[in-house]
Each structure stands twice: as C-alpha cells, then as structure tokens.
Amino acid sequence: MNVFLAVLAFVVAFVAMEPITALVHRGVMHGFGWGWHRDHHNPRTRGIERNDRFPLVFAALAFAIMLVGAMVSSLWWLIAVGAGITAYGASYAIVHELAIHRRLGPLRPRGRWMTYLADRHAMHHQTNGAPYGMLWPVLARSSTPRTNAQ
Ligand SMILES: [Zn+2]
Ligand SMILES: [Zn+2]
C-alpha cells in the first residue's frame, strides 16, 4: 500500500462526489427517483423521509466498493475511494440535514458559509431546479431567473 496513492484516491473521490451528486440529484432524484425524493420537497414532511433511502443506497455502494478493495489486492485503493465517498456523505449529512434542514434541532452548524449554502439550497427547494449541488452549488447561466428588463 502506498500512502500517497491512498490519500490521492481519497481526495479525488471526495471532490468527484460533488459533481456526481449534482448530476444524480438532477437526473435520478428529479427523474425516475422522484417517488422517493418528492417528500423531501414537501414542506409538511416530518421525521423519516422516503428520500432518506437514497443515502442508504449510496452507503451500500461505498461499502461494496470498499469490499472489492479489501478482496482484490491490486484494487486496494478502492478502500480509500470508498472512504472518500463516505466522508463526502458525512459532510453532505452535516450540511444538508443538520445545518440547512435542522433535523436534529439544536445540533445546527452555523456561519457565513453555511448561510450561503442554505440560501443556494433554498433556491433548489423553491424552483425544483438548479443548483443541484450541495457543497459547491454552482448555478448554470441559463438557470438564473430571467428578468423582464431585456
Ligand atoms: Zn433539501
Ligand atoms: Zn431535489
């Protein structure tokens, strides 16, 4: 095992998860997975959401990736990839579930960056459109609201 490669695999997996998550959110959750995601966009939902099945699926995928890494010696670095995916999932849970949707009430991280992320995520909840990302919620030019000025 090479420590440098392990750290690299971890960081690349973590960073890659943001655009992957944005694409999955747009294509799956707001596509054929809408049946699970709908209640997250319903403001009256309390407690466990159907949408909470998604993180279970993603955790199972990360576990499967790590399992392959543990069984195939030449693919050991997949353990670091799975750890990077898991770290991203934990960050997502802290930002989205705790800070933005306050699902554990007083356990609520705050700060200017969290406020920025919460504002951007509120746009998604208002429009069901962009931004679909969470830690780096980029807006495509075409997704900014049009004004009647032009
Ligand atoms: Zn949300
Ligand atoms: Zn959504």
Image (cartoon, grey):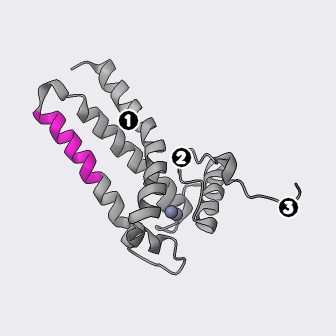
Seen in the picture, residue 148 relative to 72 is either above or below; the reply is below
Query: Is mark 2 in CB contact (under 8 Å) with mark 1?
Result: no
Seen in the picture, residue 75 relative to 127 is either above or below; the reply is above
Of pointers 2 and 1, the one earlier in the residue sequence = 1
Q: Nearer the viewer, residue 73 or 111?
A: 73
- Check the picture and name the quadrant holding the N terminus: top left
Q: Which of 139 and 106 is in front in this view?
A: 139
Q: What is the crowding at mark 2: few (fewer than 14 residues within 10 Å), some, or many (at least 20)? A: many
Instruction: Name the secondary structure under disc 3.
Output: loop
Q: Mark 2 points at which residue?
A: 135
Seen in the picture, residue 128 relative to 73 is either above or below; the reply is below
Q: Which residue is drawn at 53% across and 46% down?
A: 135
Residues under labels 2 and 1: Cα distance? 14 Å
Residues under labels 1 and 3: Cα distance? 42 Å
Question: What stretch of residues is rendered in magenta?
Answer: 59-71
Q: Mark 1 points at which residue?
A: 13
Residue 54 shown left or right of residue 128 in the figure: left
Q: Position of residue 137 (x, y in %)?
A: 59, 48
Query: Is mark 1 in CB contact (under 8 Å) with mark 3?
Result: no
